[in-house]
Image (cartoon, rainbow, N blue to C red):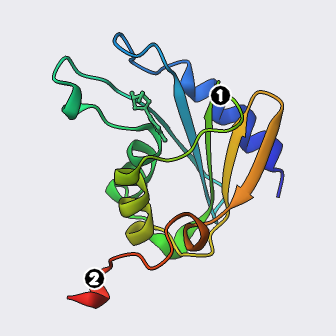
Amino acid sequence: MDYQKLVDEAFEASQNAYVPYSHFRVGACLLLKNGQRIYGTNIENAAYGSTMCAERNAVYQAYCQGYRKADIEALAIVGDCTPLISPCGACRQVLAELLDPMTPIILGCKDYYEVTNMQELLPRAFTGESL
Ligand code: THU
């Protein structure tokens, strides 16, 4: 899999970020096993808590289109920060439920990326299995 291409496409997606408050653009590129890509950016709001992160927008969009975790090949999340973007706690909780724990998650900045997964990003997650 060409992770650098996913990182590049996530950066392209970040150009659509709506960030009048933080001015911090985040982009996400979700690759489906059928080859389709679904993009996300952060969308902010004057009521700051109503902001939605890039990676949640991408994964929610995939689910809205009827895809599920078994259909997802990889997710790239990028931001122009050093060393790498790190998903917020709310995103980790959502991704832990909506992605397979071993699905590759590529965290990228301009000239570097690392590959991780939800097993590493949120060990011992609270899931529906606990209910
Ligand atoms: N943000 C994301 O979109 N994803 C992350 O993983 C970290 C934070 C956004 C939310 C907000 O619009 C801006 O970055 C600053 O927190």
- Residue receiving disc 2: 128
- Residue 87's disc is none
Marks 1 and 2 in Cβ contact (< 8 Å): no
Secondary structure found at label 2: helix
Observer-nearest of 67 and 50: 50
- Residue receiving disc 1: 11
In the picture, the quarter occupied by the N terminus is bottom right
Observer-nearest of 73 and 115: 115
Observer-nearest of 98 and 119: 119
Q: Is residue 11 left or right of residue 122?
A: right
In the picture, the quarter occupied by the C terminus is bottom left
At x 62% / y 69%, what residue is drawn?
Answer: 103
Q: Ligand 1 closer than 8 Å to the CB at disc 2? A: no
Query: What's the distance in space between the residues labelled 1 and 2, CA to CA?
Result: 33 Å
Observer-nearest of 49 and 40: 49
Work out which residue is located at the far left of the displayed protein and give it: 47
The kind of residue tagged 2 is Gly
Task: Report ligand 1 position as a quadrant.
Answer: top left
The kind of residue tagged 1 is Phe
Q: Ligand 1 closer than 8 Å to the CB at disc 1? A: no
Q: Is residue 130 left or right of residue 34?
A: left
Secondary structure found at label 1: helix
Task: Please rate how many residues cluster around mark 1, counting C-alpha atoms within 10 Å: few if below 14, some from 14 to 19, many from 20.
Answer: many
Query: Whole-percent x and y of residue 95?
Result: 44, 61
Q: Is residue 90 above or below residue 25?
A: below
Label 1 or label 2, whichever lies nearer to me, is 2
Res 120 quadrant in image: bottom right
Query: Whole-percent x and y of residue 80?
Result: 64, 24
Q: Is residue 130 above or below residue 14?
A: below
Q: Is residue 51 left or right of residue 124?
A: left
At x 20% / y 33%, what residue is drawn?
Answer: 50
At x 28% / y 31%, what residue is drawn?
Answer: 51
